[in-house]
Amino acid sequence: MDGEAAENPSLFPTSVGEKLRDARISQGLELADIAARTRIPKRHLEAIEEGDYSSMPSPTYALGFAKAYARAVGADEVAIARSLRGELGSVYDREPSPPPYEMTDPTRTPPSGLVIGGVVIALLLAVAVVVVYSSGILHGSAPPSRDPLTLPEDQIAVPAPTPTPTAIPTGGQVTLTATDKVWLRVTDADGNRLFEKEMASGESYDVPPGTKGPQVKTGRADQLRVTINGSDAGLLGPGNRNVEIGLTPEALRNRDSGNGE
């Protein structure tokens, strides 16, 4: 019987840990050498050789460590992994699935927090339904209409106040501002041309301070607004004829009887 076992070693299969240990010893290596080659802690290598895989986190770790050990000693890592899977089947048992929840089981009651939360949600839904029905939204009722003859105070049109004419100062900065496209020429008392162009709407011209006898000539005086020191002095004049008017505050004060061509 003993001779038959010696001739046929498969009757007493060697574990994965024993195979790896025999391969290591045959090469004259220590566990410290394998740990240095594989970067695997020595305690895990010892567990593999002893077949104690319960200390490892999961079968995946055990398989990975064993394959790395096999590569370090030149063993067939595929065969080692195949054999180890069979050994691990008896070490790592699957966790039993939780028993089904029986509604009729009086010992299996839902948590009190879940019950309270459900009650609160139901109350909130009830309040929302009451509010919706009381507002008449579902019945298509329109909001109360206002008296068509009565407008809210904030919608009553208030006429804009009529600006009070500003007295023209006796001296100061005179500015011409175009309210539309208009041509004009400005000269001084000696006939020197100070300014001449077609001004665009919104464009302004300031008469240089200290100018002697400034005059303006234009065919559209109604498109030029006059300001003196920032105060509105009205339009330069009518727009149905060419005008030539002095641009001093005194001349502008008397421009109703001004010169014209």
Image (cartoon, rainbow, N blue to C red):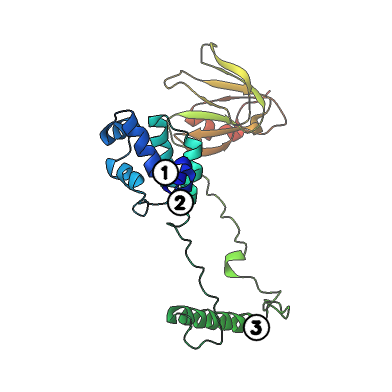
Q: Which amino acid, mark 2?
A: Glu
Which element type, helix, strand or loop, lies under badge 2? helix
Return the x and y of residue 244 as percentages of the image width and height: 62, 23
Q: Which amino acid, mark 3?
A: Tyr
Q: Which amino acid, mark 1?
A: Val
Crowd rating for badge 3 (residues with CA inside 10 Å; few <14, some 14–19, many 20+): few
Q: Earlier in the sequence, mark 3 or mark 1?
A: 1
Crowd rating for badge 2 (residues with CA inside 10 Å; few <14, some 14–19, many 20+): some
State the separation of the CA atoms marked 3 and 2.
70 Å
Query: Which numbered disc covers residue 16?
Result: 1
Query: Which numbered disc covers residue 92?
Result: none
In this view of the protein, which residue sits in the foreground, 2 or 196?
Answer: 2
The reply, left or right, for residue 122 in relation to residue 67 is: right
Return the x and y of residue 246 as percentages of the image width and height: 54, 25
Q: Are marks 3 and 1 in contact (CB under 8 Å)?
A: no
Quadrant for the C terminus, please.
Answer: top right
Look at 57% across and 65% down and name the residue there.
Answer: 154
Query: Which numbered disc covers residue 133?
Result: 3
Look at 36% across and 45% down and name the residue there.
Answer: 48
Return the x and y of residue 33 as percentages of the image width and height: 28, 31
Image position of 118 with respect to 228: above or below: below
Q: Can residue 140 be seen in this view?
A: yes
Which element type, helix, strand or loop, lies under badge 3? helix
Return the x and y of residue 162 as percentages of the image width and height: 57, 52
Q: Name the residue under label 2.
A: 87
Which element type, helix, strand or loop, lies under badge 1? helix
State the separation of the CA atoms marked 2 and 1.
8 Å
Image position of 213 with respect to 124: above or below: above
The picture quadrant where one finds residue 153 is bottom right
